[in-house]
Amino acid sequence: MKRTPLIIVTVLALIAGTYFADRATRVRPKVSVNVKADNPSPGASAAALTVAPDFTLKDLDGKDVSLSQFKGKVVLLNFWATWCEPCRVEIPWLIDMQQKYSARGFTIIGVAMDEEGKSEIAPYVAKERFNVNGQPLPMSYPIVLGNDPMADKFGGLLGYPTSILISRDGKVVKRITGLISYDEMASAIEGQL
């Protein structure tokens, strides 16, 4: 019984060590600019804004999708996985936001991070319906097959979902790790439209 505090301290030290080692070894975005956004989201300082790195990934039909295709739009990159429960909570909100804001120059790019790749993701996207304002709807925004090198371009991932809001001029203005409220996410998007 005297070993219990020692075991607890050891486990906590291992968790803390893993967390800080992970943060220290993450690949940082290569392009950083100190600019002032026209309308940064709350909590984003001008010094924290960086140019979002371009990428090209395959969609579920095997076509190339790149961030540069959405130049001039507000983009929400949403890193998610089919097994992620908080992602399932968030997906109906994303479908709603895609419908609500797309006419104003907004899009979501869902970056699916399942290790199994297309064989897991494509059937999920084809089959699943989400309750959006009382209607069962499919994911209505582009879905691409993500990978670790692409995630590392954006500073790596500590969990799912992770969303990165990119302004019309290509700057990262907000990063969200984990589930936040619909209102907070909508407010950040509206601040960029």
Image (cartoon, rainbow, N blue to C red):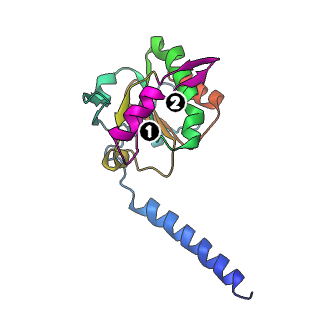
Relative to 61, say whether 84 is above or below.
Answer: below
The residue at the far bottom in this view is 2
Q: Position of residue 7 (x, y in %)?
A: 64, 80
Q: Amino acid at mark 2?
A: Pro
Q: Nearer the viewer, residue 45 or 61?
A: 61
Query: Quick one: which residue is furthest to the right in this view?
Result: 1
Quadrant holding the N terminus: bottom right
**First reached walking from the N terminus: tag 2 or tag 1:** 2
- Kindly indicate whether the residue at mark 1 contacts the one at mark 2 (C-beta within 8 angstroms): yes
Q: Residue at x 37, y 33 (%)?
A: 122
| Quarter of the rendering containing residue 71 | top left
Tell me where the magenta segment starts and ends, as one range.
110-139
Badge 1 element: loop
Which residue is farthest top? 103
Residue at (28% x, 30% y) in the render: 66
Residue 92 sits in quarter? top right
Q: CA distance from mark 2 to mark 1?
A: 9 Å
Instruction: Give 9 or 129, whichever is nearer the viewer.
Output: 129
- Do we see residue 157 in this rendering? yes
SS at mark 2 in the image: loop
Along the line of sight, which residue is nearer the eye, 25 or 49? 25
The residue type indicated by label 1 comes to Leu
Q: Would residue 101 appear left or right of 33 to someone viewing this image? A: right
Q: Which mark is residue 40?
A: 2
Please report the residue visible at 47 percent of the width from the left and 40 percent of the height from the top.
80
Of 12 and 127, which appears nearest the observer?
Answer: 127
User: Label 1, on which residue?
Assistant: 49
Q: How many marks?
A: 2
Return the x and y of residue 162 as percentages of the image width and height. 49, 42
Q: Position of residue 96 (x, y in %)?
A: 56, 20
Question: How busy is the neighbourhood of tag 2: few (under 14 within 10 Å), some, or many (20 plus)?
Answer: many
